[in-house]
Image (cartoon, rainbow, N blue to C red):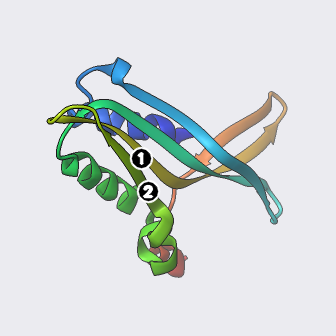
């Protein structure tokens, strides 16, 4: 699941994580959806759970970066009004006057294409395309 690594990298590169130990990542409610076509292709659908301990208040900066990342990497959740309602959820527990424990849940998908060869199976993450890009294929 490439998006787990991409999200961690985005948070680190944008200095949203000062202490790597304050970040916890997990996946829940995952399922695998085989796609019906000639090639072996499937999709992971899951809830990505991100917890940031002692995150500075307000947390608008991390939410803004996540929305930007979702627009690029999970466009169907951001362009569909129904899906967008549930794409990003959060809970915050105030720890001090200036910090909170922030728990964010994102609805994500990763599509995988499998290729068979004499050497065995190779797995390729399929990049997400915006609905506009799919229309012109």
Residue 126 higher or lower than 53, as above or below: below
Q: Position of residue 51 (x, y in %)?
A: 41, 35
Q: In the depicted view, which residue is nearer to us: 76 or 118?
A: 76
Q: Which mark is residue 104?
A: 1
Q: Position of residue 39 (x, y in %)?
A: 79, 56
Determine whether, in the image, residue 96 is placed left or right of residue 79. Answer: left
Secondary element type, mark 1: strand
Q: Could you tell me how far apart the alpha carbons at marks 1 and 2 are, in whole angstroms?
A: 6 Å
Residue 69 higher or lower than 116, as above or below: below
Residue 87 higher or lower than 69, as above or below: below
Question: Are the residues at dot 1 and dot 2 in contact (C-beta closer than 8 Å)?
Answer: yes
Residue 1 figure quarter: top right
Secondary element type, mark 2: strand
Q: Mark yes or no: residue 128 visible.
A: yes
Q: Quadrant of the C terminus?
A: bottom right
Q: Earlier in the sequence, mark 1 or mark 2?
A: 2
Residue at left offset 57%, top offset 49%: 47
Residue at left offset 44%, top offset 66%: 75
Label 2, on which residue? 89
Residue at left offset 84%, top offset 31%: 118
Determine whether, in the image, residue 84 is placed left or right of residue 122. Answer: left
Numbered disc total: 2
Q: Mark yes or no: residue 130 visible.
A: no
Residue at left offset 49%, top offset 66%: 86
Q: Position of residue 44 (x, y in %)?
A: 67, 50
Q: Residues within 10 Å of mark 1 (few under 14, many from 20)?
A: some
Residue 96 figure quarter: top left
Q: Residues within 10 Å of mark 2 (few under 14, many from 20)?
A: few
Q: Which mark is residue 92?
A: none
Determine whether, in the image, residue 120 is placed left or right of residue 68. Answer: right
Q: Position of residue 36 (x, y in %)?
A: 82, 65
């Amino acid at each position: 699941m490439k998006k787990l690594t991409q999200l961690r990298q985005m948070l680190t590169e944008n200095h949203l994580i000062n202490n790597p130990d304050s970040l916890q990542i997990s996946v829940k409610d995952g399922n695998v959806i085989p796609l019906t076509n000639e090639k072996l292709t499937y999709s992971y659908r899951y809830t990505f759970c991100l917890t940031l301990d002692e995150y500075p208040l307000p947390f608008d900066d991390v939410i803004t970066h996540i929305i930007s990342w979702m627009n690029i990497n999970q466009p169907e959740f951001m362009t569909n009004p129904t899906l967008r309602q549930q794409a990003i959820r959060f809970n915050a527990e105030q720890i001090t006057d200036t910090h909170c424990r922030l728990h964010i849940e994102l609805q994500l998908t990763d599509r995988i294409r499998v290729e068979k060869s004499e050497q065995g199976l190779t797995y390729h993450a399929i990049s997400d395309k915006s609905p506009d890009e799919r229309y012109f294929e």
